[in-house]
Image (cartoon, grey):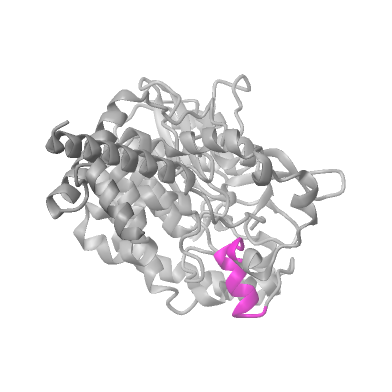
Amino acid sequence: VIDRINESVARRLGGAGTSVASFVRIHLWAVAFLVALSLILPNHPANVAKNGGNRKIDVYLHDIRGQTNVNVRSLALDTNDPRAFAPSPFGKERFHIAWITGSEGQVFSLGPSKIVALGSFTFVAELAAQRLPFLGGRQIVVDLYYLPAMRLGDSYITLLHAIKSKPDMIVFDLNPAWVLNPLAVHQWAQLDQIGATELATKPEQWPLGASLFSPSALMWGAAASTLGPIRDRAYYGTSIHDQVDSWGPLRRRPKDAVSDAPSLAQTVLTMSPADFWFQYRFNEKRTPDAEFWAKVLGPSLGGGGPLNRTLLSDIGKALKDSKIPSYVYLAQTNSTWLTGDKQIRTAIDDIEGQLEKLRGDFAASNIVYQPRTLSRYVHNLSFLRGDLVHLVRADSLGPYIAGQLCRLAVRSGYNANCAAVGKAPGNG
Amino acid sequence: MDERIRRWIAEAGIGFLVALILMVIAATTIGTVHFVYQGF
């Protein structure tokens, strides 16, 4: 029967696909049609304002237009969108600060029952920008490259992406809990495509690329850089899902979604790497106290992860090569624990010492590198209960960071009146 | 119809289908496994 079908198909299709030459021609046709489709189909550029993807993490992304003359916008797209970040919505005439941060760059608000009020918070970037509305005679805008739980590898990929937009200044923070921690160096998979493509152009970084990404990320990245429909596949994916998800057997009623207990595999696959290692390697559960956080810091001590050191060196090189004025700092650490808890104090001392040894990687006239935690310079910071880095009050942080950025701008040849920014509190 | 022309039309048709299937795969294979952010 198979022979008869083959014979019939071969006869009707004139023998297509039955020889090597024919097979090659089919592939060439496929490529030609892909190129033709990418020329014919309209572009669907990522757009922060229209970004449907922000639906999921909307609470993390907000807009403070109208509050002052300050403009701060998160460029993060949906977590399934491999373009990862939208282009800045602000005009080229503004002074663009690319601000790369995770949740350590947020200041949370507490609700009535003293728990975090979702959707009600500000960013350290906003506090600083309010104190520094103009630089070099131009109104500043902050292009916020923010993802919650951003790890060092995520930040590095984001940095490479941000540099391509040629910002006027870069702010890059290091999270004390994760900067040297080998348990989680890369978490957000939507960055893989742009990361693999960026690193492919730097042969000396191919080992790093192989450590962080799969070959498919490179394939998708290469395809996306030449073919519009592949680049915009998140748009098409959303459109297809909007159509087909309600079809018969594919439809999931809300009842099913809550009543299905997740299997162990589902649970493990959706855990963050850090949570996975804590639970299955160290048998530790999160507890909101200094003892738990001392354990989190444990793997960072006495040398930390080799991949982390490579990443830090690469971050320094990318900033040096960019020649863009850059401020790199170690984010705040729970001030009470830093002075009162021996384990935390020893751990942070160790991390600061290691980062100090990497100063050479950041030695350039365009970089201010601050490897000591912000809590050494800024006082009166309040933290979430039982938390190492997350802020709930940081009134003095805005003037301090604005002062640092202003001095960096002046050093880089911009006109700015730093006295008006306000004196930075303490500099010890 | 000449067998050669038939073969070329068939090859182009298969090529078009392959391109279309690739695009559908591209659009529907993103974000299938993703960790759920639980704070931190």
| Secondary structure predominantly adopted by residues drawn in magenta | helix
Quadrant of image for the C terminus of chain B: bottom right
Q: Is residue A318 visible?
A: no
- As drawn, A68 above or below A82: above
**Quadrant position of residue A346:** bottom right
Q: Which residues are magenta?
A: A269-283
Q: Does the magenta segment cover residue A271?
A: yes
Quadrant of image for the N terminus of chain B: top left
Residue A408: x percent and y percent?
Answer: 37, 40
- As drawn, B28 above or below A261: above
Q: Residue at x 37, y 68 (%)?
A: A309
Q: Is residue B23 visible?
A: yes
Q: Residue at x 29, y 41 (%)?
A: B14
Q: Residue at x 17, y 37 (%)?
A: B8
Q: Is residue A12 left or right of residue A141?
A: left
Q: Residue at x 54, y 56 (%)?
A: B33
- As drawn, A88 above or below A331: above
Query: How many numbered circles does the render carry?
Result: 0
Return the residue nearer the eye: A285 or A194. Answer: A194
Residue A402: x percent and y percent?
Answer: 50, 37
Residue A262: x percent and y percent?
Answer: 71, 63
Residue found at the very far right of the displayed protein: A113
Q: Is residue A258 left or right of residue A273?
A: right
- As drawn, A178 above or below A412: below
Q: Is residue A333 left or right of residue A409?
A: right
Q: Is residue A393 left or right of residue A72?
A: right
**Quadrant position of residue A30:** top left
Residue B27: x percent and y percent?
Answer: 45, 41
